[in-house]
Image (cartoon, grey):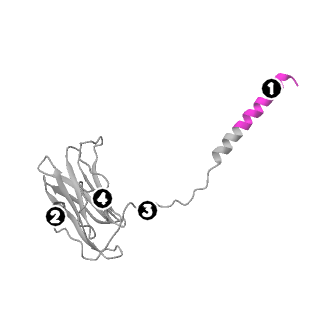
Amino acid sequence: MTPVLVRDLLMNMLLGLTALVVLVLAQINPIAKDQESLPPPGTIAVLACWPPGPVDVDVWVSDPKDTKPVGYSRKSGLVWSLLRDDMGIVNDDSPINCESAFARSTPAGEFVVNIHGYSVPAASVTVHIEVALNGNFLTKADMDLRPKQERTVIRFKLDGQGNLIPGSENKVFKPVREST
């Protein structure tokens, strides 16, 4: 055999081996493990969103264990945590205006979720609010909010095991922010 023929034969074998390796590697797929679901960030979740612009709406929440509510001036308590104080366009590059709060535990007693129009330049702004307990919605609402107005989104009572007490849900106003 001539050296050119040997070289061509070796190159063809190397090319075939490379193609075989590429094809085999494409077929290797690790077996998917059962995905563990992540625990929710809290047992009670509150989300409030409003239209883009220079509007600042605040979420205020209270619980039976804490004497002081959680809001922009006190971002965390024994039960609640405010994840973000969204001030509209101030220090924010996103047009999305949302605040969220989560309760890490569910002691027995009354919980109150309020919204407050901290800086509403127009006559009113529509705020979309969702409140969920253990992944199930307690309420979804669109509420009009005037400047400096505080409104109760929902009040509800839980038993000692974190279950909603039937018939305890209402929207009767209870000031939360003013008690800070």
Mark 3 vs 1, N-terminal side: 1
Q: Are marks 4 and 2 in contact (CB under 8 Å)?
A: no
* Mark 1 neighbour class, 10 Å CA radius: few under 14, some 14 to 19, many 20 or more: few
For disc 4, the neighbor class at 10 Å (few under 14, some 14 to 19, many from 20) is: some
In the image, residue 85 sits, relative to residue 138, either above or below, namely above
Q: Residue at x 62, y 50 (%)?
A: 29
Distance from the alpha carbon under mark 4 to that under mark 2: 19 Å
The label on residue 175 is 2
Task: Give the SS element for disc 2.
Answer: loop
Q: Which residue is mark 4?
A: 76
**Pointer 2 and pointer 1: residues touching (CB < 8 Å)?**
no
Kind of residue at badge 2: Pro
Answer few, some or many: residues within 10 Å of disc 2's Cα (few below 14, many 20 plus, some between 14 and 19).
some
The mark nearer the N terminus, 3 or 2, is 3
SS assignment for the magenta stretch, majority: helix
Q: Look at the numbered discs 1 and 4 and tell me whether their residues touch, using CB distance below 8 Å.
A: no
Quadrant location of residue 130?
bottom left
Secondary structure under tag 1 reads: helix
Sooner in the amino-acid sequence: mark 1 or mark 4: 1
Residue 10 highlighted magenta (yes or no): yes
Q: Amino acid at mark 4?
A: Ser
Q: In the figure, 67 relative to 144: above or below?
A: below
**Residue 33 image position (x, y, % from top left):** 57, 58
Residue highlighted by disc 3 = 39
Q: Amino acid at mark 1?
A: Arg
Q: Which mark is residue 58?
A: none
| Mark with earlier residue (3, 4) | 3
Where are the magenta residues, as a range?
A: 1-18
* Count of labels in the image: 4
Give the mark, 4 or 2, whose residue is nearer the N terminus: 4
Cα separation between marks 3 and 2: 32 Å
| Disc assigned to residue 7 | 1
